[in-house]
């Protein structure tokens, strides 16, 4: 606690601690405060503006008019006022520190408002039991110059006088002097064109002071809109039948209407002109409605004219044409007869068996081809899957078809065939040491095939072998039947980007097989391909026979034969498309056969594709 005596000495006592406890149901004081002119020591209405240099007082308002008189505490407690000078404006802080120094008074007098600006201070009333309420009071300190203020009329239209007039009557002098002179800029009694207009005002008070700066206001001058001529009507009328019309013309900007007529003219002689016809004015009722009964077939015109009773006399005119026709005649008749309903064309269901029958064929550009689907165990059509066999190096595949030369279709039952297509556990195991394949069904060996040379890819149903490779018996081949099966799919013949490289077949000397039908990488990819099969024999007996045969019965479908010769080349281009579709879709493979049995070969066969 700090104690200050009236002789200026101070002493601090303590510190000591204590706790203020707010009692229950304690209501805060009720009061008002404000700034007043210095001479107004007992007034009730505070001021919020004063001319710089004037003196004011700051106080709690003692108002005996309400019941109970203000200020008061609802609980009858005493009231202490605390002014927050520290958080007030810098000018008020200066006044307090220089003039007062005690912030618990209910009033402060003789304060000189000598700093322009907006100033505020908060005062808190606290009763003796700690309940508080606060008020913030403000004062604007302004220059003594008069303040101009402009009032605009609510609506101004181009070229028209307007009311009320543009006014500056609310202009005032903060010092209480009278406004003696109004100096306007762009204040007109009529504005000739629409758009935004800026109006300015400077005022002079009786003390000779001008406004610090003129006031400005923006006036929106509206365009003078022409009236709208319009008619609600039916475009077609019947001779002798009354027609109803309603004139709905109006002024969009509510200008007074001068002349307003509806004139009817009918083309009596039907010459397409109204200039030689008589017109008459139709009379409207108070709602703008009128009627007309046409007496002649043809066209009639109603002209609506309207103008405004203003100095500009803006107007509008609109023509409306009606066609007058005769009433349609009426007739009645009856009809009788028998109508046979047409046969219903109901859809026909096509079953998988129908699609697999001979009645349904699969075609290509070169004729019919085989079907590439079958009926599965669920009775639905299914596309034939493809199974790849492993390379010949002790590997195993989950399911594959046997070589037609070692395990034919006649060695398998229908159930086994379906099992391959539907995923039965059929495995083909390669064994390089014994040069054989072992075929197992559900883990049980059902066939061992020695020295196999056959296809690397197989469509699951045995009726449809994609392509095959093999020679006769023996590791090197060429010792017995000299049959060579085309190793690569026939549709690769037309794939210019396919290049399988070199492979080998029957040869007693070098065991060199044929170069692939597709080109090696060193071939040019431009030009026209020529496909051929070449052969050379060391004996002239017999002949070389190239032919396509079915897998199941060996029947020749399409053959290319050459007479006995040391060498021969057969160009395949002419029948390439047929060969491709045959190989892909009808269970066939290409076989190269030498009929001179028992003769050894120095070169069996050479397949190639060159470019011209």
Image (tube, rainbow, N blue to C red):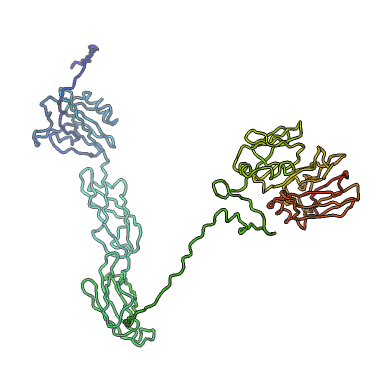
In the rendering, at what x and y percent does residue 292 appear? 26, 79
Which residue: 34% across, 74% down?
Answer: 318
Residue 498 versus residue 78: which sits nearer the camera?
498
Q: Residue at x 83, y 41 (%)?
A: 512
Q: Which quadrant holds the C terminus? A: bottom right
Residue 297 relative to residue 25: left or right = right
Q: Is residue 250 depicted above or below 3 in this figure?
A: below
On the rendered structure, is 379 left or right of 202? right
- Displayed quadrant of residue 25: top left
Residue 68: x, y in percent? Answer: 9, 33
Q: Is residue 281 visible?
A: no
The N terminus: image quadrant:
top left
Whether residue 555 appears in this view of the structure is yes
Along the viewing direction, whichever of 205 and 353 lies nearer the viewer: 353
Picture coordinates of residue 315, whole percent (x, y):
32, 72
Q: Is residue 484 left or right of residue 388?
A: right
Residue at 32% x, 47% y: name it.
Answer: 213
The number of numbered discs placed on residues in the rendered structure image is 0
The quarter of the picture where residue 404 lies is top right
């Amino acid at each position: 606690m700090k104690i200050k005596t009236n002789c200026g000495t101070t002493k601090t006592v303590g510190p000591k601690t204590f706790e203020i406890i707010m009692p229950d149901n304690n209501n805060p004081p009720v009061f008002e405060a404000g700034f007043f002119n210095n001479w107004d020591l007992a007034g009730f209405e505070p001021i919020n503006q004063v001319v710089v240099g004037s003196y004011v007082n700051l106080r709690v308002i003692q108002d005996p008019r309400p019941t109970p008189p203000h200020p008061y505490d609802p609980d009858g407690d005493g009231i202490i006022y605390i002014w927050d000078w520290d958080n007030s404006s810098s000018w008020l802080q200066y006044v307090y520190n220089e003039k007062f120094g005690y912030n618990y008074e209910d009033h402060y007098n003789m304060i000189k408002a000598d700093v322009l600006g907006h100033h505020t201070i908060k005062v808190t009333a606290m009763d003796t039991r700690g309940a508080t309420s606060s008020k913030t009071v403000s004062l604007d300190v302004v220059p003594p110059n008069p303040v101009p203020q402009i009032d605009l009329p609510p609506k101004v239209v181009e070229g028209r006088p307007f009311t009320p007039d543009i006014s500056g009557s609310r202009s005032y002098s903060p010092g209480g002097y009278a406004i003696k002179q109004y100096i306007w800029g762009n204040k007109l009694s009529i504005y000739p064109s629409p758009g935004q207009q800026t109006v300015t005002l400077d005022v002079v008070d009786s003390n000779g002071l001008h406004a610090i700066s003129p006031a400005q206001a923006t006036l929106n001058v509206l365009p003078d809109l022409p009236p709208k001529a319009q008619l609600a009507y039916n475009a077609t009328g019947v001779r002798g039948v009354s027609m109803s019309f309603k004139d709905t013309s109006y002024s969009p900007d509510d200008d007074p209407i001068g002349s307003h007529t509806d004139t009817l003219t009918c083309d009596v002689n039907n010459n397409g002109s109204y200039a030689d016809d008589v017109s008459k004015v139709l009379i409207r009722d108070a709602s703008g409605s009128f009627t007309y009964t046409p007496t002649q077939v043809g066209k009639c015109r109603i002209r609506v004219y309207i103008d405004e009773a203003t100095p500009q006399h803006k107007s509008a005119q609109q023509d409306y044409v009606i066609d007058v026709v005769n009433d349609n005649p009426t007739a009645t008749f009856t009809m009788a007869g028998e109508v046979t309903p047409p046969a219903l064309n109901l859809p026909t269901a096509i079953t998988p068996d129908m699609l697999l029958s001979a009645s349904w064929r699969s075609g290509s550009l070169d004729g019919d081809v085989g079907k590439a689907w079958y009926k599965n165990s669920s009775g639905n059509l299914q596309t034939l899957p493809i199974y790849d066999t492993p390379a010949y190096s002790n590997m195993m595949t989950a399911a594959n078809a046997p070589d037609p030369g070692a395990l034919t279709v006649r060695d398998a039952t229908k159930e086994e065939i379906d099992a391959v297509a539907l995923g039965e556990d059929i495995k083909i195991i390669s064994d390089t040491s014994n040069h054989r394949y072992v075929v197992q069904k559900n883990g049980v060996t059902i066939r061992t095939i020695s020295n196999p040379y056959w296809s690397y890819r197989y469509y699951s149903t045995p009726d449809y072998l994609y392509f095959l490779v093999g020679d006769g018996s023996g590791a090197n081949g060429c010792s017995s039947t000299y049959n060579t099966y085309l190793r690569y799919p026939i549709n690769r013949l037309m794939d210019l980007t396919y290049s399988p490289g070199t492979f080998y077949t029957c040869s007693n000397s070098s065991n060199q097989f044929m170069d692939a039908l597709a080109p090696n990488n060193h071939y040019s990819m431009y030009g026209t391909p020529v496909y051929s099969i070449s052969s050379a024999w060391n004996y002239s007996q017999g002949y070389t026979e190239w032919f396509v045969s079915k897998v199941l019965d060996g029947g020749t479908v399409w053959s290319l034969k050459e007479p006995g010769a040391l060498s021969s080349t057969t160009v395949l281009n002419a029948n390439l498309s047929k060969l491709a579709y045959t190989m892909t879709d009808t269970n066939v493979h290409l076989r190269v056969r030498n009929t001179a049995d028992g003769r050894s070969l120095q070169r069996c066969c050479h397949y190639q594709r060159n470019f011209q």
